[in-house]
């Protein structure tokens, strides 16, 4: 598969098979998740007729592949935590640590978004409620993250930065939760599109940590 048109063509063909209730094709993983009662041979045959090949993946292999793809996300968090601790090594005050953590978080995550900037908006709007309605939002989102990161690190306009952070984190988290509930297999754009991260509960955990810090700092403000 090379594009979204291939995905649509395969999904349409799979839905035409009797017994299939839902079929979701993932362009990044080149996998298809099928729900329903159908014969495997028939599914593979339909895909083969379209000019593609298909084999059955066991769950353990899928889980292992997902875990490997999430390594950049875990490493980013470790480096952000380490960086925040180093900045506050002389005197560890919780509020300062949180501001530095949030600042580094937004700077690091915006950096990865800029690596494949032209493809970020199209992926981001697949699950973010605001980006779905206002396409321009997807294009300026990395810049918003960069400005928020600088605001937290430099301790400038903190109240405004916290309010903006709360809005974008709540809406993005809502979109992620809805995507996971619907069991849609799409790419997560939290670290941009260059790394091709899958959408998992790790995304919710990441956003929840930032939401907690944002709300905590607003209460303390």
Image (cartoon, rainbow, N blue to C red):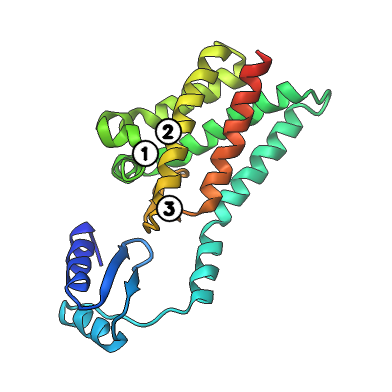
The furthest residue to the bottom: 41
**Which residue does the image show at 61% across and 21% down from the upper left?**
153
Report the number of discs.
3
Task: Look at mark 2 in the image and give the residue it sits on.
Answer: 171
Judged left or right of residue 44, residue 105 is right
State how far apart marks 3 and 1 are (Cα): 14 Å
Judged left or right of residue 130, residue 66 is right
Callout 3: helix, strand or loop?
helix
Q: Is residue 83 above or below residue 148?
A: below
Query: Which quadrant of the structure image shows residue 77?
Result: top right
**Where is residue 54 drawn, in percent x and y?**
31, 80
Q: In this view, does 81 lie above or below 221?
A: below
Foreground: disc 3 or disc 1: 3
Foreground: disc 3 or disc 2: 3
Judged left or right of residue 217, residue 3 is left
Q: Earlier in the sequence, mark 3 or mark 2?
A: 2
Task: Look at mark 3 in the image and give the residue it sits on.
Answer: 181
**Where is residue 94 drawn, in percent x and y?**
76, 25
**Which residue does the image show at 72% across and 22% down from the upper left?**
95
Q: Earlier in the sequence, mark 3 or mark 1?
A: 1
Q: Are marks 1 and 2 in contact (CB under 8 Å)?
A: yes
Q: Can residue 39 be seen in this view?
A: yes
Q: Nearer the viewer, residue 137 or 155?
A: 137
Q: Which of 113 and 47 is in front in this view?
A: 47
Task: Look at mark 1 in the image and give the residue it sits on.
Answer: 128
């Amino acid at each position: 598969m090379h594009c979204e048109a291939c995905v649509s063509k395969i999904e349409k063909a799979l839905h035409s098979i009797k017994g299939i209730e839902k079929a979701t094709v993932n362009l990044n993983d080149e996998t298809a998740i099928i729900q329903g009662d159908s014969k495997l041979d028939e599914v593979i045959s339909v895909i083969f007729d379209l000019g593609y090949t298909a084999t059955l993946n066991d769950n353990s292999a899928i889980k292992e592949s997902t875990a490997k793809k999430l390594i950049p996300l875990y490493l980013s968090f470790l480096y952000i935590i380490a960086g925040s601790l180093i900045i506050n090594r002389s005197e560890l005050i919780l509020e300062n640590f949180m501001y530095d953590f949030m600042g580094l978080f937004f700077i690091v995550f915006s950096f990865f978004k800029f690596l494949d900037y032209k493809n970020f908006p199209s992926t981001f709007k697949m699950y973010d409620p605001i980006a779905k309605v206002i396409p321009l939002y997807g294009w300026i989102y990395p810049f918003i993250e960069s400005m928020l990161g600088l605001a937290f690190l430099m301790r400038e306009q903190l109240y405004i930065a916290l309010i903006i952070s709360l809005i974008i984190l709540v809406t993005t988290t809502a979109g992620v939760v809805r995507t996971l509930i619907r069991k849609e297999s799409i790419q997560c754009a939290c670290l941009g599109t260059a790394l091709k991260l899958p959408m998992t509960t790790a995304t919710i955990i990441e956003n929840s940590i930032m939401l907690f810090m944002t709300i905590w700092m607003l209460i303390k403000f």
